[in-house]
Amino acid sequence: MTTPRLEINLSKIHHNARFLVNLLGRRGISVSAVTKAVLGLPIVARQLLAAGVSGLADSRIENIQTMRRAGIEAPMTLIRSPMISQAAEIVRDTDTSLNTELDVISELSKAAQAQGRMHGVLLMIELGDLREGIMPADLEDVVRRTLDFPNIVLKGIGTNLACRCGVVPDAVNMAELSALANAIDATFGPIISIVSGGNSSNLNWILGGADTGRINNLRLGEAMLLGCEPLHRQMIEGLFTDAITLIAEVIESKVKPSQPWGMIAESAFGKATPPADSGSISQSIFALGHMDTDPEGLIPPPGMKILGSSSDHLIVDSGRDRLPIGTEIPFQLNYSALVRAMSSPFVAKIPFSEETALALQLPVSA
């Protein structure tokens, strides 16, 4: 089978999604499944919907269009602030978008009028991570003006934390988001139906038994696909962490010194730190590199250690044994490695269920 490849276990993704939907549902929180890390792959989207998520969410309109072309009619939310140049597409192919700019909402309004459609808007609030968001002091004015746009429906508010600066969702910032929802309703009437507290990084806060206040939605991707929370990359009990695996093939296997020799300058990807001298090692090279994934986000099997990488080569200390040429080895991935691998045209994507694994000659773990 082609290498490198991503083996995508649909059964495990379905389990993870259903587990989280049920867990959060008991707290009155719906789940919007974020599909950007799998490029809107329709077969994955259908598994997420079958698991009970309330809708699908993606940062790229192109991924949403892929799902629409596949006949998926679920509610779709664009979770990156819209580009004005794509306003017509966004209104046509999504139900809701996350917004921070009145100029953009104005264009969405014009596009919605032209198409005879209503478009939902969720206003994003800045609560400290310094990515997208309206400053809280400006929120009332933005709400007032948003309500005046024809064919625009203000569905609620939300925030995003941990993605840029690593700011942790906690009792303080989540209580502030709830308070802002209450303030809007007190001023304009009960108009806030969705309060979207954030992403997979919110799970630690919720699993700790927090008072969730007005928070009634989360946008989850990493937790469902990789079974871990993003703050410390710790596995979530009850979830599979191996639903997606990257398989790479050995193209060289030799005993080599552990240290380079000769004058040292920058490597292909910047300044390199010479490795410690550990004598001769069994060094394997895999047909995998920066053009395929984020090598720093790969986790090799026990007993192996990633030594370095270039555009097309991943160098690994294979431990005691030399790996035969052509050997295929599975690597686990973090979110960065997954996104890069899914985006690479050089990495095959092989979705399978437990029922089809045998036919594809893929291993099935419990």
Image: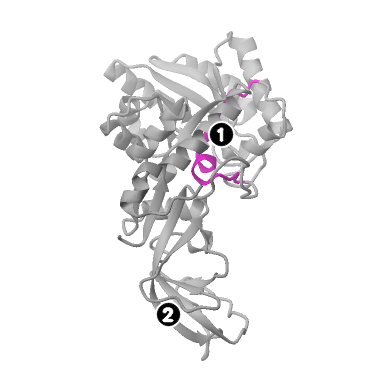
Instruction: Reply above or below: 59 against 290.
Output: above
Residue 95 position, x and y percent, is 39, 23
Which colour style is shown?
one colour
Q: Is residue 97 above or below residue 359?
A: above
Quadrant of the image for the N terminus?
bottom left
Point 51% across, 31% down: residue: 18
Q: Secondary structure at mark 1?
A: loop
Amino acid type at circle 1 is Gly
Closer to us: 152 or 160: 160
Residue 362, percent from left and from top = 38, 54
Does the image show residue 124?
Answer: no
Q: Which residues are magenta?
A: 214-230
Above or below, 286 relative to 98: below
Circle 2 sits on which residue? 253
Residue name at image x 49 percent, y 18 percent = 154
For numbered disc 2, what is the local secondary structure? strand
Residue drawn at (58%, 77%) of the image: 273
Q: Earlier in the sequence, mark 2 or mark 1?
A: 1
Q: For this view, does 117 lie left or right of residue 177?
A: left
Amino acid of disc 2: Ser
Q: Nearer the viewer, residue 220 or 82?
A: 220
Can you see residue 67?
yes
Label 2, residues with CA under 10 Å away: few <14, some 14-19, many ≥20: many
Q: CA distance from mark 2 to mark 1?
A: 50 Å
In this view, the mark in front (2 or 1): 2
Residue 334, position as x, y percentages in the image: 52, 53
Question: Which residue is identified by label 1?
Answer: 133
